[in-house]
Every structure is written in structure tokens, then in C-alpha cells.
Image: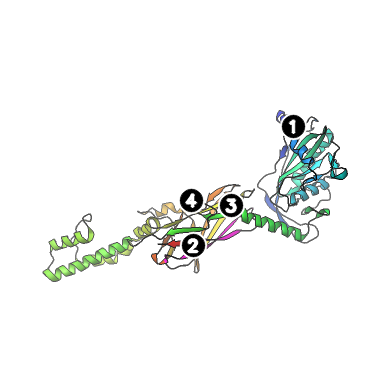
Amino acid sequence: MSSELSDTLLSGRALVFRPPARPALVSHRPPGNGTSLAVPRVRCTVQLPDRIPSLFAPMSELAELLSHQPLPGGVLLRGLPVADGREDHLIRQVMALANSDSASSRCLVFGAEQGAAGTVAVIGLCDADVARLTAQLRLCINAIEPALDVRVVTAVVTGKTVAALVIDNSSNPPYVAGPASPGDLRAGECWLFDEQGLRPAARADLDNMYATRRQRQQQIVLIGIGDDPRNEILEVQVPDNSKLPSRVATLKLSAAVKAQAIAAAIVGRDDTAMARLAHLRIFGADEPFRQDGPTTLKRALKEVPDEYREADLYYRFEERAVRMNLSVMNNCAEVLRSAILDLTFPVVAGLEFATQLCGPSGQSSNMKRAYPEVRQEKDCIRVRASLGDLTPGSTTRAFPAALRLAVDRSLVGQKIALRYILDAEGLLAPRQGRLRIKLRA
């Protein structure tokens, strides 16, 4: 036996065996009905010692647990471990306990049984009992799907050894029997405890487990605006976009054409002095003077939209844009893998979306990867972003680069509602909801 294992046993700590966190999906057929369940397939190899020593340190938590009258609902007394070859009975009990709706840790206690007047009678376990129970833990882990965390806790209570199989986290019900189940336990079987004791789960029980799990996930996966995943409203000031570069250029060129026509009508010929004064007044001192005729100015006026297209995009979607990002918080106990976030905006006159980041001098194509996918459809605008894996307890920004919106001043005072859908491996159903944008002056 390794020194690390010996230290663990002598310190009274639990032996913890954890199956892989990323199973693939396999379909199982529960008993008594024609419905198949899609549950993760688990393959786990656990290295167990050949022999468990009889020396255990007292475990005050387990002793205190057994002193409660009555025992908590998630604690079941099971006397001696099941005999070899009857492991399917133990697996059904562990599975049923994992499927029970208990807010605290659940455990099967061996070496103790129900005594008179609701007391706990400690009968104790020998070394062989503890070794058998520890070996049977491996069968439980391999036989139950999806992945389940189970640990063995041992303690000395009133001078006798007791042991417990403890389930700390079972937030992914229903738990069912996998293809590696021993004995007459069939793949897809699902068991639970109720007032009558141990029984197979019916379709209504399975539907209730899925509904409860879905509701729990809806509450613990939060999506909000900005850095706060609880924020459902974005209130922004509509920027002044009156100085659009193409608009400014059009006004200046139109004024120059008009000034030339006025000068020609007064003087009767081209006058350089008057042209310079008009240029200074219209274009300012920073713009070099050029003696352009009416034909050249009118041609430049027609070319303004093409010449200032990139400058307009940069002005509208960078300098004067409303920027929007979302935060996603995963409070689940499991990793949500390959998460995809979809947003749907209504088509509103005066509201436009950048389809990529805009640079001031042809840099747009170099920044595509950091921006979410934006797709204009007939009746809506769709935005999609891949979030990758969302670890438990993490808060993730939806977009590496915030979504850019160009908002016209005519929308001041309006509210725009958008829908979101988050889908990921690990969610029973996509997380859906609504957010709002309030536009003020």
C-alpha cells in the first residue's frame, strides 16, 4: 500500500474516486416503457488497494451525523455490505439516493442499523467488510451514468468501525444504469426512494427530474448586459452623428460650387482672390487651396459617397457607436461545453449593426475574427457568438469585441427588446430570455 493512501486512512480523510468529467452520449432504455434515455457514457478505472487496514481515526462528522434523532432524510442505514455477486442491489440503492431530492449530502451507512425507539445501533465492520465495500464502490462508479462523485468515509463510533458511501453532488439527474452494470441490472434502469422505499422510476418521475433540472439551470445560468450578468437593461445616450464625414464634405463642396457661381455673376470672370477667400471660409486654413473649376467641384460632389465610405463607417460604428456586450455566468456544478449564444434584434428604422470592426484606414479586414457574426434577415437581425466551454462559477464576456450599433437620433425615447438563446452541452434545454435597450437623449 502506498504511503499516500496510508496517510489518508490514518488521518480519517475520505477516499474519493471521481469519474471522468467529459463523457460521450449513449442511449439507454429504462424498464417498463419504450422510452430511451440519452445519458453520458462513463468509463473509469479506479486503482484500489488489495487490503484496507483496520486502523481508522475517529471521524467526528460521521459520528455526529449518526447521533441525530431522527436521522436526516438523506442518510440510510444498511447494516452489513452486500455479499459478493449481489452488487446490483448496492448500485440500485446508490442510484436511488443520487436521484433523491435532498439539499444536503446523501450517504449509505454500513456497520449501523436501526435500533429501538428510532436509535442507531452500531454493529461495526471488520476489515473484510470495509475492503468489500471499497471494492464495490468501483462497480458503482462504472455502472451509474451520468458521472457521479462518490466517496468512502470511515470512522470509529463507540469503539466500532462504520463506513459510509457519500454522494456530495448529484445535480445531473436522472441517474441510470449503464451498459457496465452487473447482475440482472439492465442498462437504462432508473431507481429512486420514496415513502414506500426503493422502487423503479416511472415516466412521470423521469419527466419531473428533467423539469426540475431544467428549472434549476434556468436560475443558475445568468445572462445580462455589460459586466453584470443580472443586468437586463442597457440605458444609453444616443450619440450626435450629425458630422458624418460624407455629409460634411457634401456641404462644403456644395458651398464651394455656390460661391463660384456667385463670384462669376458679380465679377464676370474667375477671380483668384475671391476664390481664396471663399475656400478659407468653407474649408478652413488646414485645407490647401486649389483653383478647381465648377466642373471639377461638381464631379467631386458626385464622388463623395464612394470616397468617404470607409470614413463614414468608422465614424458611425466606432467614433459614434453604441457599444454592447453581454456577460454569461455559469453557476452550474458542471462545465457547459461548446456554448453558443444567439441574439435576435427586431428590424427598426434608424438602427444599424456593424458586420465587422471598422478601421480608419482600411483596417477592417484585419479585425474580423474578434467580432461576432452578424446576419441581416428579412424580419430581424441575428447575432451569434461561440463562447467555448463555461467552467463552473465563471463569468464570461460574450464578445471579445463589443457589438457596434449605429442609432439615429429619431429613436430617442424608444425601447428596443431583444431575445437571447444560450445552448451548450450540459444544458437540458437552451437558456432563453429577453433584454432591453433604452435610448435617451
Q: Point out which mark residue 338 bears.
A: 3
Q: Nearer the viewer, mark 2 or mark 1?
A: 1
Q: Position of residue 66 (x, y in %)?
A: 79, 40
Q: Amino acid at mark 2?
A: Arg
* Residue 263 in view: yes
Distance CA(mark 1)–CA(mark 4): 48 Å
Q: Which residues are magenta?
A: 411-435
Q: Amino acid at mark 1?
A: Leu
Query: Which residue has dot 4 on it?
Result: 400
Query: Which residue has dot 2 on it?
Result: 375
Q: Point out which mark residue 9 bears.
A: 1
Q: Amino acid at mark 3?
A: Ser
Furthest residue in direction top, as rendered: 3
Q: Position of residue 80 (x, y in %)?
A: 85, 40
Of mark 3 and mark 2, the one earlier in the sequence is 3
Residue ID at (70%, 42%): 18
